[in-house]
Amino acid sequence: KNEVEQSPQNLTAQEGEFITINCSYSVGISALHWLQQHPGGGIVSLFMLSSGKKKHGRLIATINIQEKHSSLHITASHPRDSAVYICAFPTGTASKLTFGTGTRLQVTL
Amino acid sequence: GAVVSQHPSRVICKSGTSVKIECRSLDFQATTMFWYRQFPKQSLMLMATSNEGSKATYEQGVEKDKFLINHASLTLSTLTVTSAHPEDSSFYICSANKQGIGYEQYFGPGTRLTVT
């Protein structure tokens, strides 16, 4: 069983829709990252959270440490939100990241 | 704050030559930097962990003599791809941990290497 699973793998939404991306993991962690990668490659760290909920603009991230689950929500989605969204968490003393497989989001007009 | 830069953003080189990629933390000190490579539509693959002032730790299957990593200061790590071959063509990304804050990791914009 993979340590981390993301769902869905691919997601197409219309502009304005509310989007949820899920990340489930099987190991104990102390923090989780949500990352965004646009076509062309650069990675942006959206959130790092260890409990509860964080909000930045139209993006909301939640985590339930006991249930080993995190979600990323996008409200009022826009075509510029089209990207791959990846959850990741540090493991070991070197803080190496374990990455989810990513969710490819396409928002259409 | 917490900006990581990479240079160059794109590089094309001929087979057999060496290419150096720089990763800089611009507004913080990074005791640890990570180097990743990414093939199209695949996840990031960790190549090595770079610690300031010491030798890098390479992941299994990564040739340390081919991918030379130097972390000479708290703000700069370099990856040199030696004797590059077309199969080394990939997207290389670095990330950096803020000193003293182990879990905050910031990513560079990546370098696209094409070996002809």
Image (cartoon, rainbow, N blue to C red):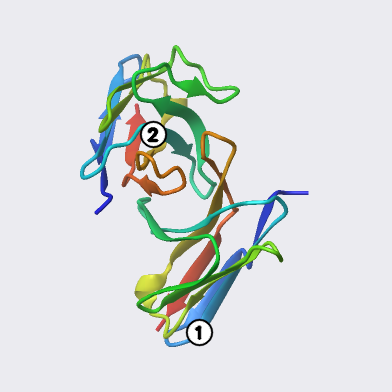
Q: Nearer the viewer, residue B9 or A21?
A: A21
Disc 1 chain ID: A
Which of discs 2 and 1 lies nearer the camera? The answer is 2
Q: Which mark is residue A18?
A: 1
Label 1 neighbourhood size at 10 Å, few (<14), some (14-19), many (20+)? some
Most extreme residue toward the right is A1
Q: Nearer the viewer, residue B40 or A69?
A: A69
The three-letter code of the residue at mark 2 reads Met
Rendered location of residue A32, percent (x, y):
54, 56
Q: Which mark is residue B48?
A: none
| A58 up-or-down from A93: above or below | below
Q: Residue at x 54, y 46 (%)?
A: B43
Q: Nearer the viewer, residue A48 or A81?
A: A48
Image quadrant where one finds the C terminus of chain A? bottom left
The three-letter code of the residue at mark 1 reads Phe
Q: Which residue is mark 2?
A: B33
Is the C-beta separation of discs 2 and 1 under 8 Å?
Answer: no
| B89 up-or-down from B101: above or below | above
Rendered location of residue A4, percent (x, y):
66, 53
Rendered location of residue B33, percent (x, y):
39, 34
Rendered location of residue B4, percent (x, y):
28, 44
Label 2 neighbourhood size at 10 Å, few (<14), some (14-19), many (20+)? many
Most extreme residue toward the top is B65
Q: Residue at x 55, y 35 (%)?
A: A93
**How much space separates mark 2 and mark 1, taking CA atoms?**
35 Å
In the displayed structure image, the side of residue B11 where residue B58 appears, left or right = right
- Local SS, label 2: strand
In the displayed structure image, the side of residue A107 where residue A30 appears, left or right = right
